[in-house]
Amino acid sequence: MVFLACVPFVRVSLPESPAFVVAYNAISTCNDLTTSIILFGHFHLLRTRALLLLASGYLFASLISIVQLLTFPGAFAPSGLLGAGPQTALWLCIFWHGGFPLVVLIYALFHPNSRKISTAPLFAITAAVIGSIVAVLAFWFGATWGTGSTGFLPPLLDAGAFTPWQRVVNLADILLVVAAFILLSLRSPRTLLNLWLMAVMVYWFCDITLSSYLNGGRYDFGFYAGRIYGALAASLVLAVLVLENWRLYRRLAVAVSRLRERATELLQTNEALQGEIANRQRTEEDLRRAQAELGRVSRMSSMGELTSSLADEVNHPIGAIMINAETCLRWLSDKVPNVERARAIADRIVEDGSRASKTVGRIRQLFDQKAPLREAVDVDEVIREMAVLLGSEAARYGVSIRTEPMEKSCPVTGDRAQLQQVLMHLMINAFDAMREKDGARDLLIRSQWEGDSQVTVSVSDTGVGLPQVPPDQIFKAFFSTKPNSIGIGLSISRSIVEEHGGHLWAATKRSRGADFYFSLPIAPQSD
């Protein structure tokens, strides 16, 4: 809107003010040079060709602005410095206003697929600075020599007014500006820098059109208005970059503040962790002392467990010995002693004593560090032996023992005495479970194959069944539902079976009674 409002007044003459030109060029030089430095800094980080080209373009604009000011008539000398003629400043302005849009146009071509520079950033910046200086010197030399005695370049100013050639060459600058704007608008993704370069091209269009194309000559309204647009064009990208750097610095300051807060939190957390570590070390020391005390108590408990096990194991044969001894005395105390029956009962007493002795030996072997005895044992034979051995005790409780051996006998690897002890535990527990239970008292011992590698023995009774606890609870040491039992037999039995490579478990699947099972590995067949 401002541009359109200025168009009708572009040829209005105003007082000459070389100081305005000095101020305009000074602003353009400082702003373009500062923008160039910032862009070179961005290039040093990103190292893309597009940024290097754009930074070089701004450096070229700042340098040629200085040379154009030095050659401008009336600024520092009536005809300008550096050997300038009346046309030199105009041609340098043409090169200035055409060279920078050309750089922006090439930047727009490079930007979408710009690659990183393979050389060192410092070397690339040095090359860009030297190239910009060489270009400015070439344009200055061309403008000075071309408008001198040779007349290589056509005149653009005649008696204070612009010539037709001036319109033609400025139209070329305008077309370059329009082409750069269109190409920037078509590129994607449209970055913030591209957007502000499009705004710069709009300002340059207004600058060239008002000050060099629509106006009539120097120091008219269009000349001043165009130069103001040019100052805005030189300041726009710089202002945006400064604002963006300020935003980045603000974010960095906020990030640093958060990092400091985080560092403080981490320091506090570290102190808390150190205190926790110290407390844990003290706790571990207390735990070591408690473990040492627990070890002492455990050794004492083991001794008590061993004593309890011996008492529990020996109790049954000793009880049988006492009963048989009383019976033997009764047969011998009759008026006519029944020697045969007394002798039979005495044989049972010997057997029970032998069983007690073997029980003590098995307990001792269980806690001995020597390697246990392993041999081929016929499971069905062990079952028959234990059924005969505990027959009298079963008769005392009114229990009927029934066995179901395998169709084909299969030996297992183990210690015969220890396997007898396991089976004895299970049978005596079954007697106790059925002692106070009304109805039939049947004990079934069955052996059967389990695949090709194991034999399973089951002991099923018709007693009170298992207690309402987890199945593995009854196999723990000192667990018992009987008031006069220590609760060590099942624990020892499971240990024996597991040492033989098998497993001992219990189940209740019937209306009454309980089932105990233990599996044993089959002995390898010898060739």
Image (spheres, rainbow, N blue to C red):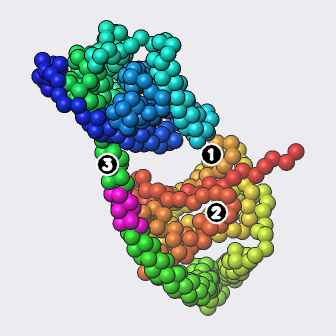
Which image quarter is the N terminus in?
Answer: top left
Task: Decide if residue 255 is on the left or right side of residue 369.
Answer: left
Taking the magenta stretch, the answer to whether it contains residue 259 is yes
Foreground disc of the pair 3, 2: 3
Taking the magenta stretch, the answer to whether it contains residue 292 is no
The numbered disc on residue 21 is none
Mark 1 or mark 2, which is nearer the start of the sequence?
A: 1
Residue hosting label 2: 497
Q: Nearer the viewer, residue 426 or 85?
A: 85
Mark 2 or mark 3, which is nearer the start of the sequence?
A: 3
Instruction: Identify the element where label 2 is drawn.
Output: helix
Q: For mark 2, does the 10 Å Cα neighbourhood hold few (<14), some (14 to 19), or many (20 or more) residues?
A: some
Q: Nearer the viewer, residue 343 or 468?
A: 468
Q: Residue at x 52, y 68 (%)?
A: 475
Residue 153 in which image quadrant: top left
Q: Nearer the viewer, residue 206 or 452?
A: 206
Task: Decide if residue 135 is on the left or right side of residue 424.
Answer: left
Could you say where residue 423 lies in the image, as x and y percent from the top left? 61, 64
Could you say where residue 503 lies in the image, as x and y percent from the top left? 60, 58
Q: CA distance from mark 2 to mark 1?
A: 16 Å
Which kind of residue does numbered mark 3 sit on?
Answer: Arg
Instruction: Identify the element where label 3 is drawn.
Output: helix
The numbered disc on residue 247 is 3
Residue hosting label 1: 450
Please name the predominant secondary structure of the magenta segment in the image: helix
Q: Which residues are magenta?
A: 253-263
Q: Residue at x 53, y 75 (%)?
A: 477
Q: Is residue 417 above or below residue 36?
A: below
Instruction: Identify the element where label 1 is drawn.
Output: strand
